[in-house]
Image: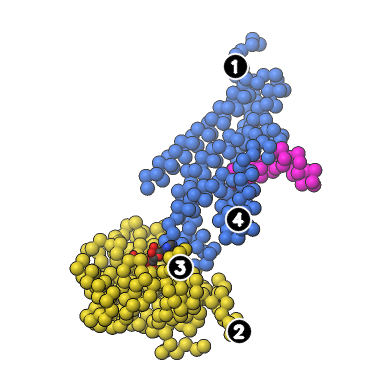
Amino acid sequence: MQANSSDPIVRFENVTKAFGELTVLRNLDFDVAPAEKVTIVGPSGSGKTTILRVLMTLEKPDDGVIWVDGEPLWHQKSGSKLVPASEKHLRKVRGNIGMVFQHFNLFPHMTALRNVTEAPIHVLKMPKGDAEQRAVELLNHVGLGDKLGHYPSQLSGGQKQRVAIARALAMRPKVMLFDEVTSALDPELVGEVLNVIRELAEEGEMAMLLVTHEMGFAREVSDRVVFFDKGRVVEQGPPEQIFGNPQNERTKSFFNAVLRH
Amino acid sequence: MSEQFFDWEYAIGFMPTLLEGLWVTIQVTVVAFILAAILGLLMALGRRSDNPWIAQPIGAIVEFIRSTPLLVQLFIFFYVLPRYGLRMPAFIVGTIALGLHYGTYTSEIYRAGIDAIDRGQWEAARALNFSPVRTWVGIVLPQAIPPMIPALGNYLVAMFKESAQLSAITVVELTLTARTIGTQSFRFLEPFTMAGVLYFLISYPSSLVVQRLEKRYAGK
Ligand SMILES: Nc1ncnc2c1ncn2[C@@H]1O[C@H](COP(=O)(O)OP(=O)(O)OP(=O)(O)O)[C@@H](O)[C@H]1O
Ligand SMILES: [Mg+2]
């Protein structure tokens, strides 16, 4: 199958994921178009993080197929059948996806610069000089051009998260996942991180899948908002519609609760 | 010559021989420690393997070695293996046995050190598509090993002292040298006292260094 521009960059097809007795994703069907910015909102425990984690290959789905840029992620083709993916295939398809974590997960033994160059050098086999030049550009871009030699322990939470964004961008993913990336930050540091993500969203060509509780921000940057509950998509549409005029009762009561907060 | 309690002349006379024994003890200790550090890492990695055909046998071997005396292992290596055609000099056999025995202890340190690495580090490494080898070499071990250094240092000091057991299989290290000197002149007080002093002069300052390191890493 040849991917063309109207094909989704990500497609969940009938994906199920359970932890023991608890089914977190139920026969989930869900697409993201290339360059589309999608925000997932929903109550705590509804499975938002799990969607991102199975896409990042941090959790293995129990059933269904996930397609990334026309290739099955957890499977590979064997004739006309799909068989479980080899490690090699997983690594190849995983290369399309990047993730920014709630708790940054920077490498504490490396400077900001090396956090950003490490994967391009060792995974993409980029020459060190090129990787460093690109890392400097990216760190400048997130406003940390003066912190190249700092270790994570010497940075504020907001600065750490911006390094983490630069680190993920350095791998040039086609899809970037953001899981509540501001929720571990002090309130006064949230803005600087959201500004960076907002700029990324405006720049365009990378698809973005965000989980956030920042409703104002979601409304601004998203092409589409997905309300998710109990492992299923309850309602989705443009942000004006989902926030302004939700149809489903559960969506309405969720937003009422959030807004009263 | 009157019978002194401690014959200094005699002691000074055998010191060069005793120092040769000390030198052998140091060589055994250093080589066996390097072996223990490497084998311990391999055992820890082996026990973590997803493949039960690797993890379980290694686990069984580690537990067996840890639960039997070093001296018995030395005798097996020295007296039993040659019967099956594996004949090696006592120095080599003793060093390997000491390294293997302590490898089972260092493997526990590695295990704890590796377990202490936050899950987020593994996940970030995976999200950035690092190979498993690169994840270990570039991300996990550089964070896990520095805090292990004091504990490894404690084992280094312990191995320095325990290497005396190699005298039982004819390795001419410090303890056996002292005994040989004593046997030849029928005076054991001086050689064993001086051997004890030499052990002390090395192991006591070394454990002070280890204590310093412990404080340094505890302060972090
Ligand atoms: N590794 C796991 N083992 C067992 N249960 C898990 C695991 N990961 C998630 N869960 C459970 O699955 C459910 C969905 O979790 P998930 O983290 O996807 O929710 P979420 O929508 O991101 O919630 P939140 O808004 O609180 O982050 C929760 O009930 C959670 O406790
Ligand atoms: Mg979550």
Q: Which residues are magenta?
A: B74-103
According to the picture, the residue beneath numbered tag 1 turns out to be B6
* Dot 4: element: helix
Q: Position of residue B52 (x, y in %)?
A: 61, 58
Q: Position of residue B88 (x, y in %)?
A: 74, 44
**Crowdedness of circle 4 by 10 Å Cα count: few (<14), some, many (20+)?**
some
Q: Work out how far the residue at label 1 is from the one at label 2, CA to CA, in angstroms.
A: 88 Å
Question: Which chain is disc 4 placed on?
Answer: B
Instruction: Report the disc number at residue A18.
Output: 3
> Main SS type for the magenta part?
helix
Q: Work out how far the residue at label 2 is from the one at label 3, CA to CA, in angstroms.
A: 29 Å
* Dot 1: element: loop
Q: Is residue B116 left or right of residue B98?
A: left
Q: Amino acid at mark 3?
A: Ala
Question: Which chain is disc 3 placed on?
Answer: A
Residue B155 lies, with reference to residue B16, above or below; the image says below
According to the picture, the residue beneath numbered tag 4 turns out to be B55
Q: Is residue B37 left or right of residue A56?
A: right
Q: Which chain is yellow?
A: A
Q: Nearer the viewer, mark 1 or mark 2?
A: 2
According to the picture, the residue beneath numbered tag 2 turns out to be A79
Q: Are marks 1 and 2 in contact (CB under 8 Å)?
A: no
Q: Is residue A168 left or right of residue B158?
A: left
Q: Work out how far the residue at label 4 is from the one at label 3, CA to CA, in angstroms.
A: 27 Å
**Crowdedness of circle 3 by 10 Å Cα count: few (<14), some, many (20+)?**
some
Q: Position of residue A167 (x, y in %)?
A: 39, 69
